[in-house]
Structures are given as structure tokens and as C-alpha cells.
């Protein structure tokens, strides 16, 4: 059974801190790893990673994938209160008719002023 | 840019009633996914469609059915509703090949009373 595990489950930091969120996966016919930020409503897309070792950056957020060790990290530098959210990691597979996203349980990040 | 549109946004039904949720994917996206997210839970995959055919099935109860129509919109039909069906139902869409990142709609919040 495909599995995605995120850690930590919850994290509380002060504004300005740097955080690292972890995601490990075991997925048959792995294709890509996606990071989403979920506040009160729909998950919003952050990054898609398909190749090992290539960092993707968007402002203060960055992410990298290690396909050998089957994990990804999401870094947020100089955190702000607006970064408070649940961060979801999802792995996609491919091949035949099987195509879905398997989500981890998320990391709840709380950034205090 | 056009996003995934779901309707209705909120729905309150009584036990044993039937509900139909609709999803309109991003134009030219050929894959639609349905997810159920209970309070404090990660999204659970229900079912996906590629080019109007069911492509994968997750933890979807037998009381639920779904289909994708010729215009690529999808409907999730839920019958004999139970209290435990109360959740946020997300639809996401993507290209199956080339751009597998999935974008989510705002969700339909179903409350069964």
C-alpha cells in the first residue's frame, strides 16, 4: 500500500525562525512529489518535484527531493505569521490506469509573533 | 487564471438523503480526483477519472458513485447519507502527462444532520 509520512506532525516557532518539514514516501511507480499549503480551505499548490537533488525555490520557501532515500524536505526561512498552516506532502504514481495522489497527514505549522 | 470550480460550497442534508457534488476542472485538464477530508484529517482519496473513464478507486463507499462527463466535469453522487459522511469534499484536476501537479477546488462542505 502506498504511504506518505510527514514529520513533525506539529511545530510551533517564532517569527523569523527557519523551519524544515520532512516527508518520506513509499509509492509504487513513483512519479512526483507535491507540496501543498492548506489554511482553512483548499490546499494550494507550492511545488512539484520529480528529479533528485534539484532545489525548487519560491521566495522564502524551498524544497528538494531525494529519490534514493525516498524523502523530501520543505524549508521556510524567516517565517511569518502568515506561514501558519498545514503543509501537506503528496506523492503521485504513474503507470497503467493507476494515477492518484497519496497524501501524508500534514505538518501543522504555527508561527507566533 | 481559471481554477477548479466546485458546487455547491456548502450543503446540509439529513441522514439517508442523497447529495450530488459537482466539479468543473481547469480547462484542458483531463484528470479529475475526488478527496474527502474529515475534521483534522488529511485528504483521503476517493476516486479519479482520466478522459471520462474511472482510472483509480480509493476508499470510496459503495453508497457513493461518480462519473466524468463529455465536457470533463465530474459529479460525485452520495446516497443514504450518514453522519460520518460530514466532511470537506475536494475535487482536483491535472493533466495526466507532462504537468501532473494537481490543483484543488475550494471544496464542498457537506454536513449531514
Image (cartoon, coloured by chain):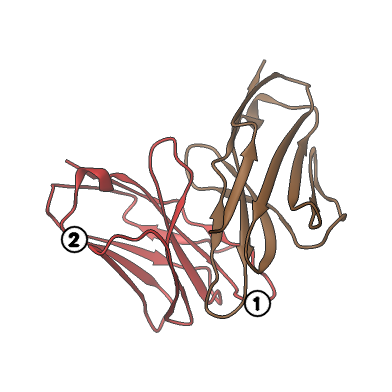
Tag on residue B79? 2
User: Where A105 sits versus B103, above or below?
Assistant: above
Please state the chain letter of the residue tagged with numbered disc 1 in the rendered image. Answer: B
Q: Which is more N-terminal, label 2 or label 1?
A: 2
Q: Residue B82: where, in percent of width, then height?
A: 19, 48
Look at 71% across and 39% down and name the residue there. Answer: A22
**Relative to the observer, which residue lies in front, A79 or B15?**
B15
User: Where A94 sits versus B18, above or below?
Assistant: below
Q: Colour of chain A?
A: brown
Look at 76% across and 62% down and name the residue there. Answer: A50
SS class, disc 1: loop
Tag on residue B97? 1
Q: Residue B16: where, in percent of width, then height?
A: 12, 53
Q: Is residue B59 left or right of residue B94?
A: left
The crowd level at tag 2 (other Cα within 10 Å; few <14, some 14-19, many 20+) is: some
Label 2 near label 1: C-beta < 8 Å?
Answer: no
Quadrant in which the C terminus of chain A appears: top right
Q: Residue A49: where, in percent of width, then height?
A: 75, 58
Q: Colour of chain B?
A: red
The crowd level at tag 1 (other Cα within 10 Å; few <14, some 14-19, many 20+) is: few
Which image quarter: residue B71?
A: bottom left
Look at 64% across and 31% down and name the residue there. Answer: A8
Task: Report the label total.
Answer: 2
User: Where B31 sits versus A49, above or below?
Assistant: below
Amino acid at each position: 500500500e502506498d504511504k506518505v509520512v510527514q514529520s513533525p506532525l506539529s511545530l510551533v516557532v517564532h517569527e523569523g525562525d527557519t523551519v524544515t518539514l520532512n516527508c518520506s514516501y513509499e509509492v509504487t511507480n513513483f512519479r512526483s512529489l507535491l507540496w501543498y499549503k492548506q489554511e482553512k480551505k483548499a490546499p494550494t499548490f507550492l511545488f512539484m518535484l520529480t528529479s533528485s537533488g534539484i532545489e525548487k525555490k519560491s521566495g522564502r520557501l524551498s524544497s528538494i527531493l531525494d529519490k534514493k532515500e525516498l524523502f523530501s524536505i520543505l524549508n521556510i526561512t524567516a517565517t511569518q505569521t502568515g506561514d501558519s498552516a498545514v503543509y501537506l506532502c503528496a506523492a503521485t504514481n504513474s503507470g497503467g490506469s493507476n494515477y492518484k495522489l497519496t497524501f501524508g497527514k500534514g505538518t501543522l505549522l504555527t508561527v507566533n509573533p | 487564471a481559471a481554477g477548479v470550480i466546485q458546487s455547491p460550497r456548502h450543503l446540509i442534508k439529513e441522514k439517508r438523503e442523497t447529495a450530488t457534488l459537482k466539479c468543473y476542472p481547469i480547462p484542458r485538464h483531463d484528470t479529475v480526483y475526488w478527496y474527502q477530508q474529515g475534521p483534522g484529517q488529511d485528504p483521503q482519496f476517493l476516486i479519479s477519472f482520466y478522459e471520462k473513464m474511472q482510472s483509480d478507486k480509493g476508499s470510496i463507499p459503495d453508497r457513493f458513485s461518480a462519473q466524468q462527463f463529455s465536457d470533463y466535469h465530474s459529479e460525485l453522487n452520495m446516497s443514504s447519507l450518514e453522519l460520518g459522511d460530514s466532511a470537506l469534499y475536494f475535487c482536483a484536476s491535472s493533466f495526466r502527462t507532462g504537468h501532473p501537479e494537481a490543483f484543488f477546488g475550494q471544496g464542498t462542505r457537506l454536513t449531514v444532520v
